Structures are given as C-alpha cells and as structure tokens.
Image (cartoon, helix red, strand yellow):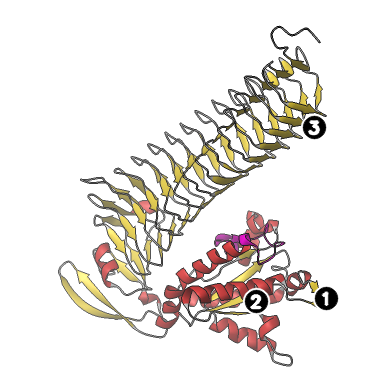
C-alpha cells in the first residue's frame, strides 16, 4: 500500500491564478491545498504515506526539472490531471499525459488516470475535436470527477471535505490492484491449465501479451470453464473469453479483467440458472463485452451483484428472469458504461445500502418494473443514459437518497419518468423527460433537490408535480406540451420555480391547490390551453415578476378560498381575462 504515488499534472497558469494573499504574503494555491488534503485523507484511510508529486513543491531550485518530472512519472501509480482550457494547450501537460499513458499501457491498465474537471473546456466532449486529438479523446473516455462548481469554495468546507473523502476512497479501492500490477510486471506468473479434466502447469510471462489467460474451446484456451479460470488465476490478470456459451455462475473475489472476444457482447454468452450470474466481491475489476443472462431457477437471483469495491462493467448485455439485472450494494462504487440492461423480471438497476456508482451511456429498457431504483441513502451519478419503456418508473429515488442525473433521455415509462420521494435530494440537469404514461417529474414526501435546464414534455400527466412539503429548486426548465397541467403543486407542496418556460400544456400552465405554496419568480407561462396560473382550494404562493401571456382561457385565476401574493407580474393577451380573483360567497363586489 505504501508504494502508491500520485502525480498532479496541471497548467502552471491555472495554479497561479488561484493563489491568495494573507497579511501581504502569498498563501498556497487552491490546487496545493487540494493536493495536501487528498494526500492526508488517503494516508488516514490506509495508515501509509501517500505522496502526490507537485512540481512547485517537489522540484528544488537549480535542479534538472525535466528529468525530475520524468522520473516522478515513472514512479507514479496514478496521474491526476487538472482539466482546464489551458491544460490541453500546454505542451508540458500533454507530454506528462503522453508519458503516463505509455506507462499505463505497459502495465495493461486503463484506470490509473484520475482526471479532475476544474474549469469548463467545451472541446472535451466535442466528437469533432476528439477525432483530431487522441489525448482529448482519452480523457473524455475516462471517468472525470467534476469539481467545476466547487473550485471557488474553501478546502475546509464540508462539501469539499466530503468530495475529497470520496476521491480518496476511490484511490484506496484502486491501490491494492494497482500496486500489485506494478509489482507483477517485474515477475513471472504461473497459470494452471484446465482442459476438461486433465490439467498441466504452464508458465506465463505476465509482462507480455501471453499474460492474457484464454477461456474457451480449442488450442488457444488455457481453461474451458470461465468459473474455473476466475477461481484459479492470480489477481491482476486479464481473462479473454472466446465466443461460446458458459453456464456457471462466476464469483470475482480478486482484481481481474474479464473481456469477451467478438464485435459485440452476443458472441460470448454467460447463461446461468439457479444462482447469480456474476458476483463481484473485491476491490477492483473489469467485465466487458459479454452477454450476462440470469435464467431464473429455484430461488431469487440477479444477473450482476456488485457487493463491494469498484467494478468497471462495460459494453455488456444484461438481464435477469428472476430479480433485477444489476444490484449495487454494500457502499460499492462501480462504473457502468455502454451496457444494455433490459427485459428483467423486476428492475433494471438497483442501487442501495449507501452505494455510489457512475452510470454512463447505458440503455436501460423494457424492464418489468423500474429502470433505475436509488434507495437507502445511495448517491450515484447517471449521465447520458437512455432509460425507456420500463413498465414502472424510469428513475425512482427514495429513502433519503440523492443522486445526480445529467443529460439522460428518459421516455415512455409507465410511471413517472423521475420520482423523488421520502426526503431524497436529487439533482436533475439537462435531462430530456418525455412521452411518459404518467408524470414527467414527481417530487413528494418532503423531498428536495435541484431540477435545472431539463426538457419535460408530452407526458400524459403533469410535467412536474410537487407534493407534501417537498421543496425543490426548479430553474431554467422547458415544461411544455404535456397532456395535463404543466406544473402541479398540491398537498402543501413548496418549491422555488425561477426562469422556467411553461408553455402549450393541455390544461393550465401552473396549477396550485390544497395548501400548495411555491415561489414563482421570473417564469414565462404562455400559450397553455386553460389558464396561465390556476390557484384554488386554499392554494397560496408568492408570484413575482412572471410573464403570463397568450393563455387560452385566461391569465391568472384565484379562487375565493386561496391567498397567493401577486406582484409585478406581466399579464397580457390572455383569453377571457387577465387576472380574476373570485369573491367569497356573500361578500359585496369590489
């Protein structure tokens, strides 16, 4: 564990811009304080020093700095690039990245670069720029930890300390297998061959391509059984699985890579009855390009059970005929990318027991219940997934969980596209939530969070529902063409709605009733088929500086038993009336 070393790679201009002054003296930069805090946190978790090389600290005046950087890169287990516009423009930064990539490839790893996204750099996810810049493409393909909204905060704030603790835990999870890989690159491994009952020993040089252990039929294979290969090979090796059908469940209890050979996952099929198909119970590993199908049998099973650590699960086709396709539990923190997760008897993905995880570019569809369930305090990141045609929710967040959902396409689900309940606090950004058979987004039971810059449309029920003292922040969304109200606030629901466009919904733009008390500031509410704003049945609300226009039946209607605060709104060109406040029964006009 003590062999782990990190290398902080950054553009010097970015570091100097973040220096501060205290009593006339230059204090250490934000990046320096970040490095110190991360190093200390890893040491706290492991009990061993974890050095992170930083040139401004570790290179002495007059030394050969180029040679020292080169030597430090060769010693480092991890590279931590600080991604800014200046990073990819710096020849020194690009050289550090290129040198470390050579080292990483020589070790047969793809997980030793840990990018920190520090300032927005639009070309990072631009396919055209990626096509002409392999270094940009490499960083974009890795898991990038987004610190852009935190870089102006003090290192000592609780939010920063929590993120540093999480990043340190990821490094600690990686350390055993990473340091083992470095050590094993200097040694020879011994792999047992199993050929259907007869076996013999074979020396395999794990520094070379022959270190890949092959499973399947034919002369190339070291093992016929994938389960046997996983049991018998030493930690840190790569297992290549030849095309075919494999029928034994696999328990991964040491760091390994298991990769299916073929142009798509259908070539290598793991079909398992009577047990979980894959159980991951170690610190680190990777499974890629395999069809993983749990075929039920007596008992309740999942296709992939991630019980601990970090599993990279990539380009697989996954389903379960017993329970859910993927179960993430025990505080684990996997990475699921480009998988198809479908046709399961229960949910597509369940994330529980304070787990994390990053789920990117997956297609989660046609599961019998929800596409994704986040529960029991879990806090994953879902990014650029397509979550569709599930018979219950698209994404269901409950039991004081969190989660960040960004740039997902969530559509044609049987229950709400996204439901956030039971004190959960979820962030929804730039998602496309549409054509659901119920609500677009449903927030209830004292839930909160941020709902920003989403496109919510053509849902059968209201685009956004806020109930039962829930209090989300709702900004910059487009809520339109829903086949009911645009926004429905009911049962003492709260919420701050600011800068949204609520347009062309079948009924009213915003509907407030039964003690609903939101703040509506600076929204555009227009071209809805009933009222722009409809408040009744003891509805309340603070309604300020909104533009309410061109709604077919009227602008603002307030029932006699409701008591909103209306101020400085621009209410024009609506149908039968602009503002109508109903008089209480028995009161004289005026």
**Secondary structure type for disc 3:** loop
Based on the picture, tell me whether residue 51 belongs to the magenta stretch: no
Decide which of tag 1 and tag 3 comes sooner along the chain.
1
Instruction: Identify the residue at horizontal 76%, vertical 25% (top origin).
Output: 548
Residue lying at the far right of the rendered structure: 24
Q: What's the distance in space between the residues labelled 1 and 2, CA to CA?
A: 37 Å
Decide which of tag 1 and tag 2 comes sooner along the chain.
1
Instruction: Tell me residue 428's x, y (percent).
Output: 59, 44
Q: Which residue is mark 3?
A: 545
Q: Which residue is mark 2?
A: 95
Front-most of residues 277 and 582: 582
Q: What's the distance in space between the residues labelled 2 and 3, CA to CA?
A: 53 Å
Instruction: Tell me residue 341's x, y (percent).
Output: 41, 46
The answer to whether residue 111 shows anywhere in this view is no
Image: magenta residue range: 138-159
How many neighbours does mark 3 have within 10 angstroms: few (below 14), some (14-19), or many (20 or more)?
Answer: some
Front-most of residues 299 and 424: 424
How many neighbours does mark 2 have within 10 angstroms: few (below 14), some (14-19), or many (20 or more)?
Answer: few
**Secondary structure type for disc 2:** helix
| Residue 412, placed above or below residue 100 | above
| Residue 534, placed above or below residue 585 | below
Q: Which residue is mark 1?
A: 23
Residue lying at the far bottom of the rendered structure: 62
Please name the predominant secondary structure of the magenta segment in the image. Answer: loop
Drawn side of residue 441 relative to residue 473, left or right: left
Drawn side of residue 14 relative to residue 358, left or right: right
């Amino acid at each position: 564990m003590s062999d782990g070393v990190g290398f902080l790679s950054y553009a010097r201009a970015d570091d100097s811009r973040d220096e501060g002054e205290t009593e006339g003296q230059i204090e250490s930069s934000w990046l320096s304080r970040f490095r110190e805090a991360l190093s200390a946190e890893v040491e706290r978790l492991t009990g061993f020093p974890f050095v992170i090389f930083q040139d401004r600290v570790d290179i002495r005046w007059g030394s050969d700095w180029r040679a020292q950087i080169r030597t430090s890169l060769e010693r480092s287990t991890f590279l931590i690039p600080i991604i800014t516009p200046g990073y990819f423009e710096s020849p020194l930064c690009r050289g550090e990245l290129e040198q470390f990539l050579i080292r990483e490839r020589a070790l047969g790893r793809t997980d030793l670069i840990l990018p920190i996204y520090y300032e927005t750099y639009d070309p990072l996810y631009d396919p055209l720029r990626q096509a002409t810049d392999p270094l940009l493409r490499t960083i974009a393909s890795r898991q990038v930890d987004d610190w852009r909204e935190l870089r102006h905060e003090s290192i000592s704030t609780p939010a920063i300390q929590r993120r540093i603790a999480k990043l340190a835990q990821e490094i600690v999870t990686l350390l055993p297998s990473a340091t083992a890989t470095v050590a094993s690159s200097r040694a020879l491994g011994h792999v047992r061959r199993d050929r259907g009952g007869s076996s013999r020993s074979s020396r395999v040089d794990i520094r070379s391509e022959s270190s890949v252990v092959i499973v399947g039929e034919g002369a190339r294979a070291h093992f016929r059984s994938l389960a046997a290969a996983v049991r018998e090979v030493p930690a840190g090796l790569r297992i290549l699985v030849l095309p075919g059908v494999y029928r034994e469940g696999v328990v991964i209890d040491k760091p390994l890579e298991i990769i299916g050979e073929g142009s798509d996952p259908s070539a290598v099929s793991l079909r398992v009855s009577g047990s979980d198909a894959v159980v991951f119970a170690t610190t680190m590993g990777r499974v890629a390009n395999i069809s993983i199908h749990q075929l039920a049998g007596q008992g309740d099973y999942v296709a992939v059970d991630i019980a601990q650590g970090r599993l990279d699960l990539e380009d697989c086709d996954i389903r379960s005929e017993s329970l859910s396709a993927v179960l993430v539990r025990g505080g684990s923190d996997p990475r699921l990318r480009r998988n198809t997760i479908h046709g399961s008897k229960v949910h597509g993905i369940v994330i529980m027991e304070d787990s994390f995880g990053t789920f990117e570019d997956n297609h989660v569809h046609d599961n019998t219940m929800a596409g994704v369930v986040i529960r029991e305090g879990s806090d994953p990141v879902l990014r650029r997934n397509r979550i569709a045609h599930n018979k219950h929710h698209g994404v269901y967040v409950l039991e004081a969980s969190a989660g960040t959902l960004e740039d997902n396409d969530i559509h044609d689900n049987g229950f709400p596209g996204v439901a956030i309940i039971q004190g959960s606090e979820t962030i929804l950004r730039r998602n496309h939530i549409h054509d659901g058979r119920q609500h677009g987004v449903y927030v209830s039971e004292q839930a909160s969070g941020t709902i920003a810059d989403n496109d919510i449309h053509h849902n059968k029920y209201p685009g956004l529902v806020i109930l039962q003292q829930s209090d989300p922040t709702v900004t910059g969304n487009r809520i339109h063409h829903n086949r009911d109200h645009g926004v429905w606030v009911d049962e003492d629901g709260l919420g701050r709605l600011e800068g949204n466009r609520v347009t062309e919904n079948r009924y009213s733009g915003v509907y407030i009733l039964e003690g609903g008390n939101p703040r509506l500031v600076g929204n555009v509410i227009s071209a809805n088929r009933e009222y722009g704003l409809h408040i009744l049945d003891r509805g309340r609300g603070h309604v300020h500086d909104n533009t309410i226009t061109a709604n077919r039946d009227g602008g603002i209607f307030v029932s006699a038993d409701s008591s909103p605060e209306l101020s400085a709104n621009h209410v024009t060109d609506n149908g039968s009336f602009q503002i109508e406040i109903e008089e209480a029964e028995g009161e004289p006009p005026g």
